[in-house]
Image: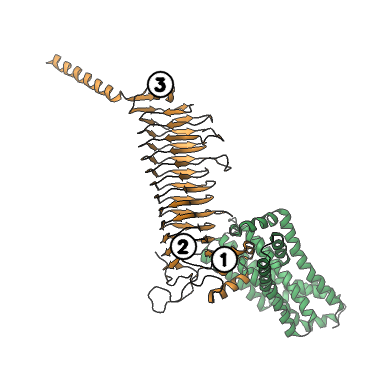
Chain colours: A green, B orange
Amino acid sequence: MLKILKYSFYDLIRSRWSYVYFLFYLALGFVLLFLNNDVSKAVITLMNVIIVLIPLIGTIFGVMYYYNSREFTELLLAQPIKRSSIFMGQYFGVAGSLTLSLVLGLGIPFVLYGLLRSNAIFDFSLLLITGAFLTFIFVGLSFVIAISNENKIKGFGYAVLLWLFLAVVYDGLFLMSLIVFEEYPLDTFSLVATALNPIDLSRILILLKLDISALLGYTGAIFKKFFGTDLGFLISIAILLLWTILPILGLRYKAGKKDF
Amino acid sequence: MKLDVQHIKRILGFVFLIGFQIGLANTWTVCSNCENSSIKETILRAAPHDTLLIEKGTYKEFEILVDKPLVIKGIGYPIVDGEKKGEIFRITSDDVTLDGLFVINVGVSYTKDNAAIRVVQSKNFLIQNMVLEQLFFGIYLEKSSHGKVYHNRIIGEAVDEYNSGNGIQLWYSSDIEVAKNHVQGTRDGIYLEFSDRITISDNVSMDNLRYGLHFMFSNHDVYTRNTFENNGAGVAVMFSKFITMKNNTFRKNWGTAAYGMLLKEITDAEIVGNIFEENTIGINIEGSNRIKYLNNDFIGNGWAIRVVGACYTNSFKGNNFLYNSFDISYNSKLNDNVFEGNFWSSYTGYDLDKDGVGDVPYRPVKLFSYVVNRTPETIVLLRSLFMDIIDFSERVSPVFTPDNLKDAQPLMKIRP
């Protein structure tokens, strides 16, 4: 598995897309810091970008890589290698290289602009951690979709739909239910609904760490009471981990059963 | 001749001595080891219009009653220590001046509003250059008028609202000037109740538990050039008429229930040239009519203006709205307020005829802020992509937000 991981990883590192992705974050980080020169404000803007773009890029990249390396995968399958290690290797290769681009691309400009001396370092590392989680989650989900669909168009369609659902439609349904049931106490419901969607969970986790959390009012106070404590933080990390592990298990299961 | 010169010298010396004594006749010096060692007793001995000079030292006294016109002046900030036993100065006469004392340790009481300095039914008083620390209430003006509270420093250590007092409190007082004071760490920095024609200028009120400045049932008051920073709410104006608020700065009143300015049941006020910077809510308006908001700057607030209800015939003109999360939040479909000629940093229209005024009206109410007003829990969707999308579509064609709530003449360039 490690060999395959290494191969996929180096393959991607050498590919143009990794560089483009890396340069994109590098440019984004520099431009943001150049424009407002305030590390903690840049973290807020960055959050908006991260919670939308990382899942999208993770999804598309994952599907693309799977379909592109299909022939090579078939070649590998003919060798005496365990199936799970082939797919796990590819998965970790893709997710790892994307995460590396993210961490380096954003880390370099922020470190140069004095992140280490500012007190935003914790917020920033939280941003990178959730970013990494989102990458792993969405690459995993897209691999599962790709392996279940022979048809590339269908696979792409489902993957984009999945992103659309979690990034946009879910919030719409969430909002609708909040408004429809506004007569009822909604605190627990909104806590649970937020925790179930990795994008919402990351957004709230980061928001609560920033000054802007004061805007959340008393609902925010309830959230802070839950997520702000060590236990709440551990629970949310556990949920993100669960979101990461479930697609991996699904991928192993599918890979083990699939007839190539 | 020689004798004559000495004679003249002697006479001159005598005249000088007498003159000196007449000059000093009304001046009493108080110090810890001279004849007059107690402020309280010296006041008893002094005649009206005398001057008391308090020399440097510590005077452990409380309930000092000033019942005749006196000038009480500290030299080198003598300490008057009330030892937490009760009220310290109580002024019941007209024409009293307190100057340059360091008053500490006012007794906390749950039945009496003990103050470091209380002025009762007096006129023409002057309280200046005082430093008050470890206090319950600071300066308490009760049914007094035509006085001046100038350049004092009031530093409290209030922790809870129920057992702390206000920095400067005016109760049934009128025609008083409160200027250049620094108040911090009290419950309300400056509190006015039933007090008319008060001028409040150049004060700094910060880190207070509740409000920096608080008006209740007080009319025709003016406050200018004050700074309100990091209070529970910068200024609360309630049930008052004809208040003028000019060129004040409201900064960093930040927290889940913090406001820059809180208006409730206010009419005919003018709010001109103020700066609201980094407050959770810049101005919260409830039941306030005929108010003019002119040339204010709203910078980086959560909500610049939140209209809670029943606000009619207000006009917002020439204000700058810069980088607020929400410019205006509005909870009804009826709008009777005028927005005109403001600059909005999130305005995206164009100006084809180059007259400096945008050709497309700006709608300052986001759908999201409307939804949040209806169902507060929806705020958890703050900064999610979905909300941005529906905000955009609402801006293109308003359905939920009041159709006529718009700035038809938004400025293209920021008002300098």
Q: Nearer the viewer, residue A212 or A58?
A: A212
Residue carrying label 3: B36
> Alpha-carbon neighbours of circle 3 within 10 Å: few (<14), some, or many (≥20)?
some
Which quarter of the rendering shows the N terminus of chain B? top left
- Asked whether the beta carbons under mark 2 and mark 1 sit within 8 Å of each other, the answer is no
Tell me which residue sits at (13%, 16%) in the image: B4
* Rendered location of residue A214, percent (x, y): 59, 57
Chain of the residue under label 2: B
* Rendered location of residue A210, percent (x, y): 61, 58
The label shown at residue B312 is 2
Answer with left or right where residue A99 lies relative to residue B231: right
For the residues labelled 1 and 3, the Cα–Cα distance comes to 67 Å
- Asked whether the beta carbons under mark 1 and mark 3 sit within 8 Å of each other, the answer is no
- Disc on the earlier residue, 2 or 1: 2
The answer to whether dots 3 and 2 both sit on one chain is yes
> Alpha-carbon neighbours of circle 1 within 10 Å: few (<14), some, or many (≥20)?
many
Residue type at the position of mark 1: Ser
> Alpha-carbon neighbours of circle 2 within 10 Å: few (<14), some, or many (≥20)?
some
Residue carrying label 1: B369
Which quarter of the rendering shows the C terminus of chain B? bottom left
Relative to A142, does residue B287 appear above or below in the rendering? above
* Rendered location of residue A197, percent (x, y): 71, 67
Residue B295 in sight from this viewpoint: no
